[in-house]
Image (cartoon, coloured by chain):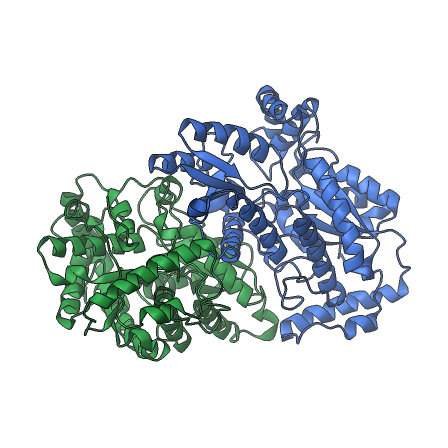
Chain colours: A blue, B green
Amino acid sequence: MLASSPLRSCRVGLPRSNNLVIPKPSPSSIAHSTQPAATPSSLDNRRQLATQAQTLGSKPSSKGPTAVVLLNLGGPKTLDDVGDFLSRLFHDRELIQLPFQSRLAPLIAKRRTPKIQAQYDKIGGGSPILRWTQTQGKAMTELLDELHPETAPHKAYTAFRYARPLTEETFDEMAEDGVTRAVGFTQYPQYSCSTTGSSLNELYREIQRRKDRGAPEANIQWSVIDRWPTYPLLIESFAKRIEAVLETYPEDKRDKVPIMFSAHSLPMQVVSGRGDPYPGEVAATVSKVMDRLGWRNPYRLTWQSQVGPSAWLGPQTSDTVKGWAKQGHKDAVVVPIAFTSDHIETLYELDIELQEEAEELGMTLKRAESLNDDPTFIRAMAEITASHLSAIHGTGFKGSFEDAPGKSVWNQGLTSNQMQLRCPGCINPVCGESKSFFAGKTSS
Amino acid sequence: MLASSPLRSCRVGLPRSNNLVIPKPSPSSIAHSTQPAATPSSLDNRRQLATQAQTLGSKPSSKGPTAVVLLNLGGPKTLDDVGDFLSRLFHDRELIQLPFQSRLAPLIAKRRTPKIQAQYDKIGGGSPILRWTQTQGKAMTELLDELHPETAPHKAYTAFRYARPLTEETFDEMAEDGVTRAVGFTQYPQYSCSTTGSSLNELYREIQRRKDRGAPEANIQWSVIDRWPTYPLLIESFAKRIEAVLETYPEDKRDKVPIMFSAHSLPMQVVSGRGDPYPGEVAATVSKVMDRLGWRNPYRLTWQSQVGPSAWLGPQTSDTVKGWAKQGHKDAVVVPIAFTSDHIETLYELDIELQEEAEELGMTLKRAESLNDDPTFIRAMAEITASHLSAIHGTGFKGSFEDAPGKSVWNQGLTSNQMQLRCPGCINPVCGESKSFFAGKTSS
């Protein structure tokens, strides 16, 4: 459990830059890469990256693996872990802001623990998210070694925000392995400051803490895959999961049953007040999945997991079921569209809670399986990492469904261009510092 | 001005069906069309359409043109028209629901008239929307005659919701022209029940009114293009407008200046309460435009034109400018992403009001020109109509940027599949009736 609010930890010891150390390709292979004709602006970017790569000449090459750090919120492994998990969650000022937070957070967590323990009890006594993340990480790095040998060997690490392994534990492991180059890979395809933003800020703070105590792993060279809402193989993976469910309906229903894409909601204070990009990125995923499905079925994007009395983005998933039941619908397909593996929101909220509500209303819901260890999804993870590394190293990797390398939001350099734009209502200075740091800019 | 609430007008005299009369192609050309291999479900759809086409054999072919009816809210042509425009707007229960609406609407309209007149005065004394719509309609139907001769000649009509020509006037014109086949083509690329839904419901009510008095034009055969948020040529047109603005920046700024995509907002009661699909469809447009631009610049989707004390979807466009100014941004590109021609929201709200706010904050905004008479946009309008007609008539038309005919949301038959799914929180019975009618189903 974090001892105090993460926001307080880190206002000193900022780095001057995060120049990239490139372990494998020679400067000449970068100068003569197979990238398509570059625009003046992307040329600037390439020159900057090439300069970074050339500085490598004078440095010893790394013996550690290229780390791929899978960032996620995590979940309690056992019922005994629920209290600590909730306490960390309520301490996170990037997720939720409470008065007297460092004192209130443990109290709220304690009060909620029995209820949440009961929910985890119903799904087998704990969250499967660590198991899934480790399975995904292992499979994807094996494939990544083949796809992008220039940066091999790759090793997957897990860094959870509210459960073990926490960022600091992951850092210890990377230090032991002699890692000097790491990719922070958010496991939320759609960016929110409450999720990916919080993970990246925590990562940034941990780097500063290690820098302050002179630890060598503070010099690990980072880049981040900060969003990938429309990555073609991700879309393919979702679409296949949905098609598998649609196949279970008789022909006359198959293209008429409505699809409910359900994503975790956010408070309106975050959506309208701060201007978080998440709702739009989730909608982008949905639109691309519907493109891929040929717009066969009618659909809605709905929002789940609202808590507390304040206004959250809707329509709520459960209200949608109620509304459709009233309108005479008997069937719907439910698709978790903002999570890539099972956890409480799918296994309890959708599979138990929502199913019970639907049954009472005379509706039959079928849920598209989470991506979990779907081979298409594992390939998505590996290809996007290869694509990201390729954009930095100029190795010309092209994913299965990509027309050309290096022209989308996930392969623009050390971060996406989009990540560098803060939310219009952002008043968290760590966001600005963290974004500059990961972009390799001198922090202010 | 409508004498009373539109919702009251039409609960009787519902049609049994809206079977399509196809003026040109023979049943054999439909049976042997060049459409790609069909799935069982789209086969069903094709069979249904072919059956509708075959019924043509026994009917006289039409002498009137194929009507393409451009649906939009409209705007007051002169300052004297502002009062009537506002009164119609506040009467529309599909846009806004007030207590004692038929008595309150004229009062609110009267109170607001001077303020809105002053705004129109600043943009030249009236809305240019009729002029733009007529220019677009004429140019697009000329091209459409070439692209889809099977349904030529085509003639463009305008039907505004709150300004002249109103739906009833348009109907009179179509009756005079001997129209028997019409496409209702929403000029809002992204569907909202408050905009396209309101226009289609009004069209449906007008059809019923004419049916009640036995007018022959009540038998016009309709299909609708109800949404086209990601139509490839629409995206191309937006992207070119943005590129033209970006070109005006020096090279070192060009790919760094943030883009603000601004769309008309909606009350949260409509977004979260009713579950309107509009925000997601606007986000889909934005994502595709950014795809086309290679995600060069950072961007945000923001929402404008909020009125009244209730909560609306944000972040608000003007708050975004304030936030960015605070964060030190000096420049931004503003892109109206949910309107296709200029009117008060672009010419006054963005070009005058927002510009003044930005200047006070030391920011320089440049606005992407509205699509207006952009030849790429005119082609978009013509191709999407050809694509829609082709899907119904099986003529195999393929748009400039389409891989294959007949597989997206705008060319699925008489309406999109998506239009047949009502909002989960919808309690307006006319929505259900109107959707069934335009889909050619027997209304209940």
B409 lies above or below A192: below
Give the farthest residue toward the left.
B213
| Figure quadrant of the N terminus of chain B | bottom left
Image x and y of residue A373, in percent:
68, 44
B384 lies above or below A211: below
A305 lies above or below A43: above
> In the picture provided, is B289 more to the left or to the right than A225?
left
Say which of A40 and A119 sits in front: A119
| Figure quadrant of the C terminus of chain B | top left
Say which of A251 and A11 sits in front: A251
> In the picture provided, is B78 more to the left or to the right than A442?
left
Q: Residue at x 29, y 50 (%)?
A: B435
How many marks the image carries: the answer is 0
Q: Quadrant of residue B8?
A: top left
> Is there any visible trace of residue B11 in the rendered image?
yes
> In the picture provided, is A164 more to the left or to the right than B387?
right
A197 lies above or below B140: above
Image x and y of residue A232, in percent:
60, 58
> Is there any visible trace of residue A439 in the rendered image?
no
